[in-house]
């Protein structure tokens, strides 16, 4: 027997219609490519998005066709979010910070026929155009007058395209399982892989973000969107803010700390989100360049961090500098991304300041919709006792089922779980703590050593700028840890001093078998340590 | 092209599994039928619910079969919420405060084969048993020892049933559009009509309740559930609290103000919900019987009100007595129920105290998922200008499509809108203000007069206990308002004094053509004014 309730589909078109109906005048502020501030609102974004949809239909695009973007957090990018997906096409956001060959691979693999590019990013794209056979149109996200004179003659200005298009009248009814957007993961090995979101997964994920235990996004918020729109849909913010009627503040490409400070202050930002690296720079700026009065001028009340583990020191700095709560979250491109959020429970109110920071340095509890499982090497479920550490798997309506180009379900195990590749513990209150990447964990004598714990312990030494720990084959122990250390400029240090510093912070049998000092460590384009490279270089170091 | 995301169904079984996994030890406190306090938690509720499911399967029940309840807010009722619906059967909650004939009609119409009854409510049910042909089992929600000796011999104790049943191992995979629960509206005309919720509508509605702009329910909350579990699923609280891991406090049948005060204090309630009538009694108690220190002992930080318009005086009393925010909401049995919630926007921060109270006395803004439309008598959409007043229609995934026993879609107009029967205005910020029921609005000379506005204006007079305004046929104006007034005991008042009091509060042409003083006014079993009766009685009053 079926219920007798309405069966509206959860679609991105329905979402922007909601915003235009209920909070049409709520502001969107954007720093443009020329540095100027432009102002729009949800009502205008909806009208412009209908023009985008009309223009794309005019170019012959149909439902399911891909429209790629190479763009910063600016107003036209937001309009494309709704114009493309709302009309049934697929928005394929591409990270302009990748290497040109990766950009070419990703755009080509996604199969976009239209590529929309910020004018300042045209120089990245133009050399690649001859190698993108599916591409038929390149749109520069500016007006005709602002189109660089050097631009490829085939490039059309966004405003010209829109001016010549009739807006669609309303948003089409779509199957909520239809594809809506596409984002590639940049792993440290192999080619990037595409995650193809659906309208349903996107809307459910955005609803979850509004919940009091997640971002608690509300109509009262002014959101400074530091997370790029090309990073997993900016963690869903374009959708969740339209849903509740938050004000959006888009910083463009100016995400240096002074620019972020000024924008946060001028636009009354109450909420912001981004990776820890950005926030370290922001806190440095606040501490060194701003007076207490200038810090007080900010209205931020919480910072949402993810993309990498949030160090305790960052949580403490936000607390001490701004009286602001840091909410650490965990997720992946494959999980839309928000899967867990760290907020203290009522019984944690008794914690002292240090205990609270320690708690907040965990990845947090699963939001409703997300199931977590940790398992041992044989696939047996491990207990949620805060002790057992195992491979983390995840399941839920905004978790991927297969990568773009493969079959649905092909990325899952027999029971529908997606293997995150992370190693984690879960405590009895449900708090997740990621301890390592499975491929980075060091398997020593049948036990696991966390490379991340060792790196964190090393970087807490004042002289250490960065540390990398890898497992190297060992004749007796299977693997043993090797630590590579980059010191701050001008510092001098020996292995003994590092070992002494580590002792007491980690178990004795975790101490690295060797510590090497290096000038530089290899990184991916997105700034992650490239441990595959290190493992190759040092493969025979212990004669294993 | 479909997205490549997982397609988990949104089910009530999945919801209680989430609670048992993520917050198994979060407490559920319940006042039992004998007045004692019993304690459980989400983990235990899930295990007991699997026993309920096993027991019902043992009785031969299959997916879609109805299980009726006649019960207060007690632990077994909560276990049935999950045991019945989670296993694929339909929980049919029945209001024990209705007249026996209405109870018989509703249970019979719903077609339940099992009826679960609180032991203190058995005397209501037993005389009806012979007239419920579909009913095969009556379960008293207690153990065998507590079964009243007077009980019908066929009545089985809940604990006996559970003790003899094997729990189901896990929650079945269900189509999210399957029916989950059934609740009847008690209108003022005609027979009650059933609203048949689905798993999908229930889960989406619960997700919405967690959002910061709605109840903002969180894992930190302790929820005193004053709204009965038989009133539209207690506004979704059993589901939304399992979703976030809130503590639940179930007051049983003791919803007198002193009992509620003690329970709120002892269990640290932070959130409560109920109809204005209950809260008036609660505030009276706080003001008259409790010291400032005793009021301070409460940890309530917000009160959620609905079911009837919330008077300004209640909002002011909660603010002044407890420093507590009153959140008015609007909805119907047909809307699951939460459709709008009233929370000030950021630009309302400039309002003075009176302005804020006035704002909070509106029904609020549509939550995401709900679409509102006001239209004129010809079906044309009216503007959201805060002036135009018209018939309110509503649409969304937790709004009904047809009443139980009818076709899907049969309760909707051609564009899928459900006619609420209410008359309302919507302002440019999206704030809804219900001005009347369509059938109660007075149509005078082509314009509408709000009976509710007139009644509110009258009851603000110190001598007036209650007022009812009806439209009576009029030879010239089509209809004109007639006001019936019940004075507080011992008061004396004439029509002139009332007219003088109304003048200035309403337009001159709204003033009633006659004012009659009465000893009593007719009400429905749920306490609503029975205006149909008044219209019959006074049909010829103006000779129309």
Image: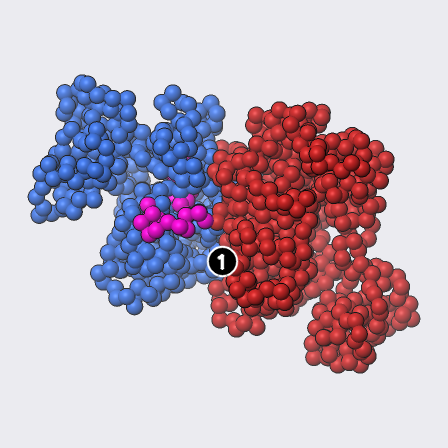
Chain colours: A blue, B red
- Measured from the top left, where is residue B345 in percent x and y? 51, 63
Q: Is residue B491 left or right of residue A218?
A: right
- Of the pair A143 and A102, the residue shown nearer to us: A102
**Against A302, is B322 above or below?**
below
Q: How many marks?
A: 1
- Of the pair B515 and A380, the residue shown nearer to us: A380
Q: Residue at x 84, y 40 (%)?
A: B127
Quarter of the N terminus of chain A within the rendering: top right
Q: Residue at x 79, y 71 (%)?
A: B489
Numbered range of the magenta stretch: A329-358
Q: Residue at x 40, y 40 (%)?
A: A431
Question: Which chain hosts label 1?
Answer: A
Quadrant for residue A103, please give it: top left
- Of the pair A43 and B257, the residue shown nearer to us: B257
Q: Residue at x 30, y 58 (%)?
A: A320
Residue at the disc numbered 1: A219
């Amino acid at each position: 027997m079926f219920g007798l309730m309405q069966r509206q589909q959860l679609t991105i078109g329905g979402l922007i219609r909601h915003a235009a109906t209920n909070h049409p005048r709520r502001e969107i502020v954007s720093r443009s490519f020329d540095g100027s501030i432009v102002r729009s609102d949800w009502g205008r974004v909806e009208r412009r998005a209908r023009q985008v949809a009309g223009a794309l239909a005019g170019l012959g695009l149909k439902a399911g066709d891909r429209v790629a973007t190479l763009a910063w957090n600016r107003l036209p990018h937001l309009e494309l979010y709704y114009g493309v997906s709302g009309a049934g096409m697929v928005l394929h956001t591409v990270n302009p910070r990748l290497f040109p060959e990766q950009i070419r691979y990703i755009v080509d693999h996604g199969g976009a026929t239209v590529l929309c590019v910020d004018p300042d990013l045209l120089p990245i794209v133009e050399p690649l155009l001859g190698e993108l056979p599916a591409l038929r149109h390149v749109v520069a996200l500016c007006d005709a007058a602002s189109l660089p004179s050097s631009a490829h003659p085939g490039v059309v200005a966004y405003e010209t395209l829109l001016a010549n298009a009739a807006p669609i009248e309303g948003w089409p009814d779509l199957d909520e399982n239809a594809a809506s957007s596409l984002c590639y993961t940049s792993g440290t090995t192999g080619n990037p892989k595409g995650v193809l979101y659906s309208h349903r997964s996107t809307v459910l994920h955005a609803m979850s973000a509004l919940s009091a235990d997640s971002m608690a996004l509300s109509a009262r918020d002014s959101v400074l969107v530091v997370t790029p729109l090309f990073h997993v849909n900016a963690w869903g913010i374009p959708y969740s803010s339209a849903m509740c009627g938050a004000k959006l503040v888009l910083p463009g490409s100016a995400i240096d700390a002074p620019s972020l400070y000024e924008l946060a202050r001028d636009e009354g930002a109450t909420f912001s989100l981004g990776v820890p690296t950005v926030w370290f720079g922001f806190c440095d700026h606040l501490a060194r360049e701003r007076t207490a009065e200038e810090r007080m001028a900010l209205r931020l009340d919480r910072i949402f961090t993810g993309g990498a583990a949030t160090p305790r020191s960052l949580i403490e700095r936000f607390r001490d500098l701004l009286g602001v709560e840091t909410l650490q979250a965990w997720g992946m491109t494959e999980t839309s991304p928000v899967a867990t959020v760290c907020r203290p429970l009522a019984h944690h109110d008794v914690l002292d300041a240090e205990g609270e920071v320690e708690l907040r340095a965990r990845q947090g509890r699963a939001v409703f919709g997300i199931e977590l499982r940790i398992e041992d090497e044989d696939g047996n479920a491990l207990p949620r006792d805060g002790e057992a550490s195992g491979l983390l798997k995840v399941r839920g309506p905004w978790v991927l089922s297969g990568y773009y180009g493969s079959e649905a379900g092909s990325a899952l195990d027999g029971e529908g779980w997606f293997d995150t590749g992370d190693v984690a513990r879960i405590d009895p209150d449900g708090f997740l703590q990621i301890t390592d990447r499975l491929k980075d964990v060091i398997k020593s004598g049948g036990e696991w050593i966390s490379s991340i714990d060792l790196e964190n312990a090393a970087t807490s030494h004042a002289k250490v700028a960065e540390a990398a720990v890898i497992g190297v084959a060992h004749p007796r122990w299977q693997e043993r840890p090797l630590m590579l250390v980059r010191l701050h400029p001008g510092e001098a240090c020996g292995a003994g001093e590092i070992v002494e510093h580590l002792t007491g912070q980690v178990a004795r049998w975790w101490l690295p078998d060797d510590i090497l000092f290096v000038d530089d460590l290899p990184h991916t384009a997105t700034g992650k340590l490239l441990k595959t490279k290190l493992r190759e270089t040092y493969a025979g170091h212990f004669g294993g």
